[in-house]
Image (tube, rainbow, N blue to C red):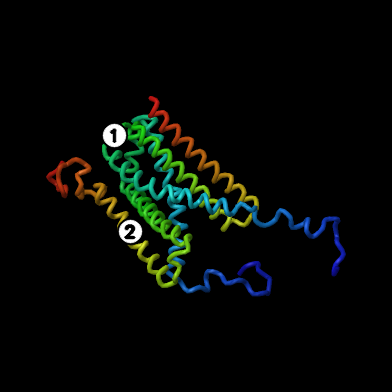
Amino acid sequence: MSSWTDKRPMSPHVSIWKWHMTMASSILHRITGVGNYIGIFIVVAWLFATAAGPDYYEPLASIVGTIWGQLILFGFTLSISYHLLNGIRHLVMDAGRALNPKFASFLSGLVLVLSVALAVAIWLLAGLVPGVDPLNITGTGNMIATGAAQ
Amino acid sequence: MSKPQETMRTPLGKVRGLGSAKHGAGHFITQRVSAIALIFLVPWFLISLIGAVRGGYDSALTWVADPINGVLTLLAVGAALYHMRLGMQVVVEDYIAKHGAKNLLLILNTFVCVGLFAAAAYAVLKIAIA
């Protein structure tokens, strides 16, 4: 299996632990952190393309506008909202609060639900979901844009 | 003395310099200070940016050219890059055990973050001064 030959007992490793909400939350915090690391390349590329001119901006905008671009962008939104909300939870725990196991698990679950809700809310309110624009950001004048708004 | 010493180096001399670099507290604190800044900067950036990008290239250019938007954008991107450099450093240190590969990735991590900041700063300044 592995080249491990030391017969002495190993310290407990990932596989023997029962999954807890706080454990999943910790792992997810790291995964979304790495996700944000990748996502900021898009932000800097957008800034750079804005400075470089329409010749750079338009190709980037059309790539981001594809269905895969939109999916990646929504994933990035999700990653940011989770890492942001869970980061606040981490700061609270760093201050020595909310460490009671039951409450910590509850808060981990709450952060997960709220972060998905936040990402969906951002996309709905910003008019990024086709056909939905409650704040009229796209300027079509419709509360719920329909086929009539061209 | 159970064993005779094989070299002239004392046991203390052999272990000196190993272990932590004694910079853990600084890493911990700066990670959190940048996190606190990002709690304010990221929501502002998201809300403000979404409005700007909806109008296409011209609206994006006007948005970045605004002095407040420009400064806050550099603060948001700068704090994010600083924060993610610290975060990625820990990820590399946790998972990459090989000395050479670890150091290579740590250097690469710094280069990527500094490089991205240079690109962002160049972009904002170019638009602001133009």
Q: Are marks 2 and 1 on the same chain?
A: no
Quadrant of the snapshot with the C terminus of chain A: top left
Amino acid under disc 2? Val
Q: Is residue B9 above or below residue A100?
A: above
Residue B115 position within the rendered picture, expressed as x and y whole percent measured from the top left: 51, 38
**Residue linked to disc 1:** B59
Residue A121 position within the rendered picture, expressed as x and y whole percent measured from the top left: 27, 54
Judging depth in this view, the residue of B38 and A123 nearest the camera is B38
Q: Residue at left 64%, top 50%?
A: B100
Label 2 resides on the chain identified as A
Q: Is residue B83 left or right of residue A130?
A: right
Which residue sits furthest top? Answer: B130
Name the mark on residue A116.
2
Amino acid under disc 1? Ser
Judging depth in this view, the residue of B42 and A150 nearest the camera is B42
Give the secondary structure at mark 1: helix
Q: Residues within 10 Å of mark 1 (few under 14, many from 20)?
A: some
Residue A37 position within the rendered picture, expressed as x and y whole percent measured from the top left: 46, 48
Q: Is residue B123 above or below residue A20?
A: above
Q: Residues within 10 Å of mark 2 (few under 14, many from 20)?
A: some
